[in-house]
Image (cartoon, grey):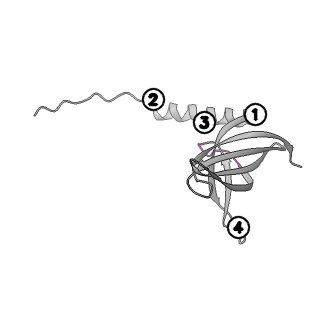
Amino acid sequence: MNVTTVPVATHVPVATHTRNNERASERQYLELPHRDKDILYCRTRPAHSATTTSIFTVGSWLGDWEYIIKGVNVGRHNLAGYQIHFWFVVDGTVWHGVQYTHQPFLCNEYYAHVYKTKRTYP
């Protein structure tokens, strides 16, 4: 039995790839207040308080910037099982996010569609 070797595809160097991702993340952070919608990633952070066990945040997929989620509402969805609506504030404007999942809570490290609303936050 003859074994043939398959040539390995060349990859972008890690340093260049990371630098481009950081630039894209910074650009997304600067442009978010001027956009109407985007895709962000939800995360769960440990809270440093005796009354709260964790803090839910939404931000870039690199995790270098994020906003704290102010409110969460869980509802049923016919295909995914659950749809989770949440709200957060960017520069005084309330944003609304939706995540579709099979679990009845915000999934860690999972994307969500976010939309700017007309409401403002004091």
Residue pointed to by mark 3: 22
Task: Looking at the image, tell me whether mark 4 or mark 2 is earlier in sequence order.
Answer: 2
Q: Amino acid at mark 1?
A: Asp
Residue 82 numbered tag: none
* Marks 4 & 3, CB-CB < 8 Å contact: no
Q: Which residue is mark 1?
A: 36
Q: Secondary structure at mark 1?
A: loop
Residue 113 image offset from top left, x and y in percent: 66, 41
* Magenta highlight range: 61-67
In space, the residues marked 3 and 1 are separated at their CA atoms by: 22 Å
Q: Residues within 10 Å of mark 1 (few under 14, many from 20)?
A: few
Q: Quadrant of the N terminus?
A: top left
Dot 3 or dot 1: first in sequence order is: 3
Crowding at dot 2, Cα within 10 Å, few <14 / some 14-19 / many 20+, comes out as: few
Q: Is residue 65 magenta?
A: yes
The answer to whether 67 appears left or right of 92 in the picture is left
Please state the horizontal and vertical placement of residue 118, each as a whole percent of the image. 84, 39
Which residue, given by chain and number where applicable, does mark 2 sit on? 12
